[in-house]
Amino acid sequence: MAISVLIADAKPASRQELVYQLERDSQISIVGEASDGRAALDLTRQLRPDVVLLDGAIFGLDSLSVIDQIGAASPETAVIVLIEGADVDLMRRLMRAGARDCLMRPVAPEELISTIRSVHTTSLKQREAFITPTTKHARKQGEVIAVYSPQGGAGKSMLSANLAVAMAKAAGEGGKPPRIALVDLNLQFGDIDLMLNLSPQNTIAGLAQKGHGGIDAELLEQYLTLHPESGLKILVAPSTPQYAESITVYTVEQVIETLRENYDFIIVDTPSQLQDTTLAVLDASQTILLLTSLDLLALHKTRTALEMLRQLYAPEKIQLVLNRANSDVGISVADVENVLGVKLRTKIPSDGRIVVTSINEGKPFVIYNTQTPIAKQINALALEILGHEGVSLVADESRNGGGFLARLFKG
């Protein structure tokens, strides 16, 4: 059955060019043309096309309003917007409004037809998933755990990788397939693949390019890399920094949502910069593991980050993790809790030799050095998150803190 397309463009010459391009494909049927936003809405209500090709500068109504109203009038209709120039902010707003894809003019006939086909296929799959009856109970959506620190070098990737591996290993005991995923969102300098000795064929950059019309579970699985020792699935960061710009908020949101529908837990290693993609993950997460250390600069940045996060999220969502907690630097755990005003979720001991060796060999210490204090603590955290009985994660600190640190951070 042909894909029905409605063309909405104010310029007759542009409409004619689109008609000429689409007539090359016998599987695409042009069912109507509109010269302004209101006509596009009226024809959409009447014709219920599979796809609306919408000029981003359509007359009569703002394109964002047109997209929103098309979604309300004909939910099965997918909108592809044609824009002039690479306006990333505009593309982001159009996607948030409900557009399935954005194409920059001039667009080659092959790219236009390919995009229409891809968007239509994704729409059909989503529609079938929505209306197909099932005798099984609906899967509970997975929990997103964001590992964040405002301080570079705090050990985020170390914690993310080993926590995810430990959770997958524990969840897979008894022959069950572990439904644990790890996303490396350090888009410029991610190195989770190196830490786990992986040689991935695909990365999130390739997924962003392939999935510009929508990301479903089948497509996403092709871009996940298996960690054989644990069964963990990893979405690896781009191989080179220049690809980072190709990953938009829309891509990240789709990745997280699709993973939630198919995995029980999703751990995300976030960058220290609070960019839009980082905030998208923090918004979607049920837990933010905020990592800090017994370091004056780290604590100062953590306090600033806490103040901002508390304005955005419920207090219980933000959970403090202290790394290198046994360092003898004159600052105690009680000092940290008093100054930051947050009780620790857990404290991870320092063991530079084990961590560095683990990274150099690509062997996560939670499964290769299980008897070390650092491995025991992260494994205990993994079990606790999974809902298993575990050891106490934070030893009691009997002495009062707050001395010079409280005075230093006063006000």
Image (cartoon, rainbow, N blue to C red):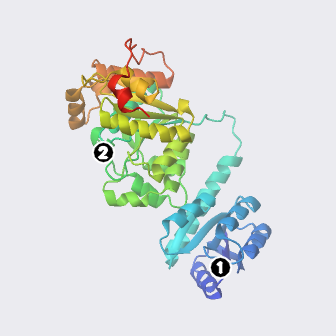
Residue identifier under label 2: 191
Which image quarter is the C terminus in? Answer: top left
Where does residue 78 sit, x and y in percent of width and height? Answer: 65, 63
Whether residue 104 is situated above or below residue 381 in the rendered picture: below
Dot 2: element: loop
Dot 1: element: loop
In front: 211, or 309? 309
Where does residue 181 sit, x and y in percent of width and height? Answer: 45, 38
Residue under the image location 32 percent in, 42 percent down: 152
Contact, mark 1 vs mark 2 (Cβ under 8 Å): no
Q: Which of marks 1 and 2 is nearer the N terminus?
A: 1
Q: Residue furthest bottom?
A: 13
Residue under the image location 35 percent in, 31 percent down: 408
Report crowding for label 2: few under 14, some 14 to 19, many 20 or more residues within 10 A (C-alpha): many
From the viewer's perspective, is 411 left or right of 296?
right
Residue 215 in sight: yes
In front: 76, or 318? 318
Residue under the image location 71 percent in, 58 percent down: 75
Amino acid found under the numbered disc labelled 2 = Asp
Figure quadrant of residue 135: top right
Residue identifier under label 1: 9
